Image (tube, rainbow, N blue to C red):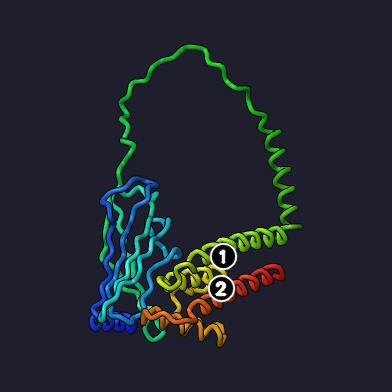
Amino acid sequence: MLIVLSFLLLSLCSAQNVAPKGNFLVDSLKIGENIPYALSLQYPKGMHVVFPDSTYDFSPFEYVRRAYFTTRSDTTYSFDSTIYYLTTFEIDTIQRLSLPVFIIKDGDSIPISTAEDSVFLIELVPVVSDTLALKEDTKYRKVNLAVNYPLLTAILVALLVIAVILIIIFGKQIQQKITIYRLRRAHKRFLVKYEKLMAEYKEKPEKLLLFWKDYLEDIEKKPYTKYTTKEIIANHQNGTLETSLKSIDRVIYSERYTEDLKENFMFLLDFATSAYEEKIKKVMHD
């Protein structure tokens, strides 16, 4: 399988001359500091490509956020770029990163990676010498009274027993309430941002479509951001969904606005809300 995939990847790259570029925009960072990493790709117009999202493993870095840029196209090529803001808590002096771009071809997702780039870690705490002289201090210092460890241990054990009993009796209900609370909060955020993105759906339909896929990915735990329209339709068997997604794809790839574009995006909003409501019902009945 790996040999076949490698052959397909080499064939695709050589045929289409697709080579993603990725690099850090600064050459050094401090622990916990955000650092920008730029990922870009020029590819033949009409090819379907997907960049890594927040679910990707950016080790040794951690994902913070990302900034999209509108696809630019001419008669032959399209150009996409994204800036990822990452952070690290590793202490290696030199830290390296290479990111893939996924090409969707014939129902397969083929990764093509950038060349590895590196940054230097700035050390804030120097090595302390072990030859420091100690200074004597014979002044009286008041110390706190000893802790009653047997009593403290008994209290902690009692609290632990009570917690275990509560978890056994009410654990499932508590977990359900927590899950439902998180789902409702996430859905409210989704509705607010979706409404904002609808204000520019004509200019940036691909941004709104990707945000919709991100939300469904969180709800259904399926890789919607990597799915093609054909794969999404196969998962749901919904005629209206098929019509809406294909219509939106035509606008994105042909860059020609259609009158039913807003109606199609409103259907996607209703579809996402239905998926959220089904998820709530499933959690309540599990």
Is the residue 280 above or below the residue 231 in the image?
Answer: above
Nearest the eye: 157 or 167: 167
x and y, in percent, of residue 157 in the image: 70, 43
Which tag, 2 or 1, sits closer to the chain's start?
1
Q: Element under label 2?
A: helix
Q: Is residue 158 visible?
A: yes
Residue beneath the point at 38% across and 64% down: 68
Name the mark on residue 191.
Answer: 1
Image quarter hosting the N terminus: bottom left
Separation of residues labelled 2 and 1 (CA atoms) = 8 Å
x and y, in percent, of residue 243 in the image: 51, 86
Residue beneath the point at 59% across and 64% down: 187
Q: Residues within 10 Å of mark 2 (few under 14, many from 20)?
A: some
Residue beneath the point at 38% across and 61% down: 67
Is the residue 182 above or below the residue 208 in the image?
Answer: above
Question: Which residue type does callout 1 highlight?
Answer: Leu
Image quarter hosting the C terminus: bottom right
Q: Is residue 68 left or right of residue 75?
A: right
x and y, in percent, of residue 120 in the image: 27, 49
Q: Is residue 81 left or right of residue 62?
A: left
Q: Which residue is mark 2?
A: 269
